[in-house]
Image (cartoon, helix red, strand yellow):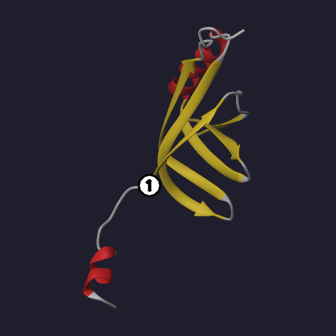
Amino acid sequence: MSEQAAEYGKHTGRLEVVVKFHEKPPVLQVEGGHQFTLDCGGTRVVAAVSAKAWRKCLSAMETYPEWVGAVSGKVAVVHEGVIQLRDCGLQVFEKKPKVGAS
């Protein structure tokens, strides 16, 4: 192995994922919060969030006529087409109509 190739593998990084969704996912109550799974074109992403974060976002989903949600987290496990996230954050944004759209 060349010196340059050996140096290439020495640096570490952190893999984080953001998944956007526009339909309320079914959730499971788990210890300390709620867990849900999103299907991303055949790859499933599993995330768990605190009960407080879920309640806050659920309220936004019910309030906004159109919305988009985003869950983000660090990749904990990747196994057989499933990505398990840890240290997840969840946000819901109001989706406003584009100006001039008819």
Label 1 environment density (alpha carbons within 10 Å; few <14, some 14–19, many ≥20):
few
Q: Amino acid at mark 1?
A: Leu
The image quadrant where one finds the C terminus is: top right
Position of the N terminus by quadrant = bottom left
Given residues 99 and 6, the one toward you in this image is 99
In the picture shown, does residue 41 fall above or below 101? below
Q: Is residue 27 left or right of residue 51?
A: right
Instruction: Please say whether residue 32 is visible from this viewpoint.
Output: no
In the displayed structure, would residue 6 be above or below residue 76?
below
According to the picture, the residue beneath numbered tag 1 turns out to be: 15
Q: Position of residue 3 (x, y in %)?
A: 25, 86
| Residue at horizontal 63 percent and vertical 19 percent from the top | 67
> Callout 1: helix, strand or loop?
loop
Question: Is residue 68 visible from the viewing direction of this image?
Answer: yes
Instruction: Identify which residue is drawn at 66% across, 13% down.
Output: 62
Q: Is residue 2 above or below residue 87?
A: below
Residue 32 position, x and y percent, is 53, 36
Residue at x 71%, y 28% (from the top left corner): 23
Q: Please tell me how many numbered marks the rendered image carries.
A: 1
Residue 94 spot, x, y in % from top left: 57, 15
* Nearer to the camera, 70 or 5: 5
Q: Tell which residue pokes out farthest to the bottom in this image.
A: 1
- Name above or below for residue 47 compared with residue 60: below
